[in-house]
Image (tube, grey):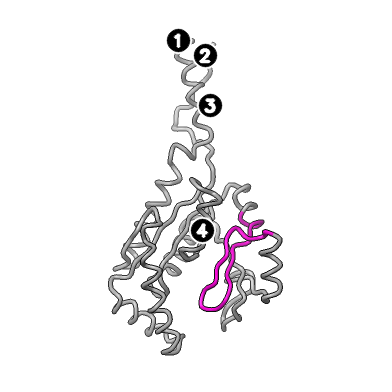
Amino acid sequence: MADSIPSENPDFKRRGVLFVLSSPSGAGKSTIARKLLAAEPDLAMSVSATTRPMRPGEVEGKDYHFVDLTEFRRMVADHEFLEWAHVFGERYGTPRAPVEAMLRSGRDVLFDIDWQGAQQLHQIAGGDVVRVFILPPSMDELERRLRGRATDSDAVIERRMARAAGEIAHWDGYDYVLCNVDAEDCFRRVQTILHAERMKRSRQTGLIGFIRKLSRHHQDD
């Protein structure tokens, strides 16, 4: 007797996506990340550890895990990071254990990291990593957005602008490159990329079994 075949498209099990968003400061990746997390219940944020001081309004464990330099160095030595980097004189890293726990639970993981972190993550996780780089419409617009935030001094803004050029130079290390002219439109395009990557054949771990089931059904007929 032939195996019963579902009347609807099967919901194949799949491997999780490690979804990376990178951009220069002020190009909009944090806004897009927040919108993506609000719209996608199966997506969880990777919370980085950092040695920089906590800023007003930030929450330990939600925005960052705030650690001192000694603890950060211990975590590096004990291989507790998937990736880490120096940024503006401070250290930032992605703790390994929470990411692995989220993947085991069937969730995708969102990373707000720079090109160095994206490169390291890709070296470790390869095809499970999807890298998206977000460009500003122009350098003048980037500076206007940074000044509009009114959170940084002129000296810090100058440093961010100088760093932005170097970050943009690494655009070709990403799978997708978008220009954030309109935040809502850019968000929709990022969301489309996530949905398409989830459906890639290589991520559908239940596909081979389903194909075999179809083949047996055909032979029985």
Q: Look at the image and give the residue range highlighted in magenta.
A: 79-99
Q: Which of the two discs, 3 and 4, labels the residue nearer the N terminus? A: 4
Report the residue at 61% width, 53% height from top: 102
Label at residue 110:
4
Look at the image and say whether residue 63 sits in the magenta stretch.
no
Q: Secondary structure at mark 1?
A: loop
The three-letter code of the residue at mark 3 reads Gly
Q: Which tag, 2 or 3, sits closer to the chain's start? A: 2
Residue 118 in the image: state x and y as whole percent. Answer: 49, 59
Quarter of the rendering occupied by the N terminus: top right
- Please tell me in which quadrant of the rendered image residue 74 appears: bottom right
Quick check: is 87 in the magenta stretch? yes
The quarter of the image holding the C terminus is top left
For marks 1 and 2, the one nearer the N-term is 2
Which mark is drawn over residue 2? 2
Which is in the foreground here, disc 1 or disc 4?
4
Q: Is residue 66 above or below residue 16?
A: below
